Image (cartoon, rainbow, N blue to C red):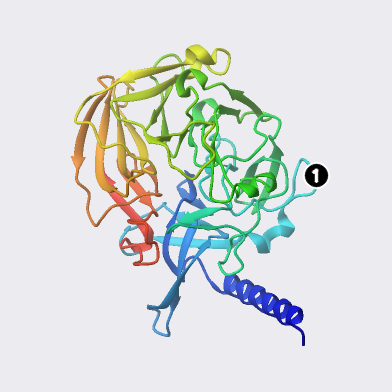
Amino acid sequence: MNLFSILSLAATLLGLIAFTQAQQLDPLKNFCRRLDHQSTVKDKTLYIHGGVEIFTNIDGTGKQAGPKSIGINTYLIFVDLSGVWDWKTNLSLTSFNEREESENVTSNNGPGVPAPNVIRGALYQGTPNDPNIYLFGGTTSFEGNGTVYSNSTILPGFGNPPTEPNSLYSYNPALKAWNRTDVSAQSPIRPNSGAYAEAPDQGLAFWFNGEIDSGSSPSTQALGDAFVAVLGMLVMEMGNGLKVTNVSTQGVSGGKPVVRGKMVYVPGFGKNGVLLHIGGSAKATTDVSDTPGEMVGMDVVDILDISQAPANPEKAWYKQSTVGDFPSPRMDHCLVLASAQDNSSHNIYMYGGRDNKGQFFSDVHVLSLPSFTWTQVSTGYGGPRYGHACHVVAQRQLLSYGGADSENLTDTCDYEYRAVGLFDM
């Protein structure tokens, strides 16, 4: 057997090992840690899609054993939030493998395909009378411990960027089926790491700035470990028939779009409510490198008047100074909103995050409106957390899901049971 045949056989065997590994690793049974996923809460169910997952082997007694591996979660996970549950002992999680359900996938734009396995995208709940949830954005590339993982044959779930046009995917839980709508005319290349929010009462969803990298599109694979920050904000009208508009953010971002910031919808603030953007890292559009950019301070927040967008985007954005005990600048944090019943005042809770210098945060801060005053309400517990997602449940609880506590993802597993934490607001 010549050298070429030996190498070909080795590659084939390696691919088979990777395929078998991906099939055998269950996102719940082999769970160690999950971060940079997409999630949303609808009808008392928490939906979790994609994300980087750290898998661990399980021995005969059900305990974690052996080495850990990094992959992308290829299952859609459901967390039942109805009834009585204890987040530390009896939380109910179920999942199904989206690749095995491909026969149920349809599309209104040609042959259907399953939603891509991505990280750092957005999952929207949609309007109250719409049974679907929606996936937008994300990448198939992940950088961890100084290594860029993309299309790796030894890590489960990682693959090439999707070849279909940039799309908004809708998922119907009852049918277990995905649909796809082409939005490439407004957003040619799938972005990731942008801030997102939605106003379900108005049927609106938003995606702000972000980046493109080697996992965004087949045309961007040559970027390697570099990424490019992108301007603009997509406004998606989710009512009868999808309408997508790309709104200019030049007035608020200038030539430095923000990546890994967070955004929250505040209803009853102004005519149609506002969006608040907090934190992240600003990077020039001309900077094609792996440098993270400059951290955005907490002494000023960006506000979008929804009534002015998308008709008058240059007047829709403005900057608002804040006062109080300023948190450290951060990215990959999470935000949730708690409002008075009459919407006369609002508290925006910010939990965790990290900066671009290797510092990780576990604290909880509150930005109170309309005074725009920062107050630290907790130093945290258990350790730092970034790359997580937060949602409001039972009207008074901040539910945190997933995340990591350091750059060494395989050092330890998540200290939270099922990666879920609760903070009483």
Q: Position of residue 44 (x, y in %)?
A: 45, 47
Is 302 drawn above or below residue 107 in the view shown? above
In terms of image quadrants, where is residue 262? top left
Label 1 Cα crowd, 10 Å radius (few <14 / some 14-19 / many 20+): few
Amino acid identity at mark 1: Gly
Residue 387 lies, with reference to residue 256, above or below; the image says below
The residue furthest right is: 110
Instruction: Please name the residue shown 20% across and 37% down the image.
Output: 376
Identify the element where label 1 is drawn: loop
Tell me residue 367's x, y (percent). 27, 29
Q: Going 35% across and 25% down the picture, which residue do you hit?
A: 301
Left or right: 224, with 52 as reference point: right
Tell me the residue at 48%/11% (across/down). 315
Residue 129 image offset from top left, x and y in percent: 57, 35
Q: Which residue is mark 1?
A: 110
Q: Does any portion of residue 273 appear in the rendered image?
A: no
Residue 348 falls left or right of residue 26: left
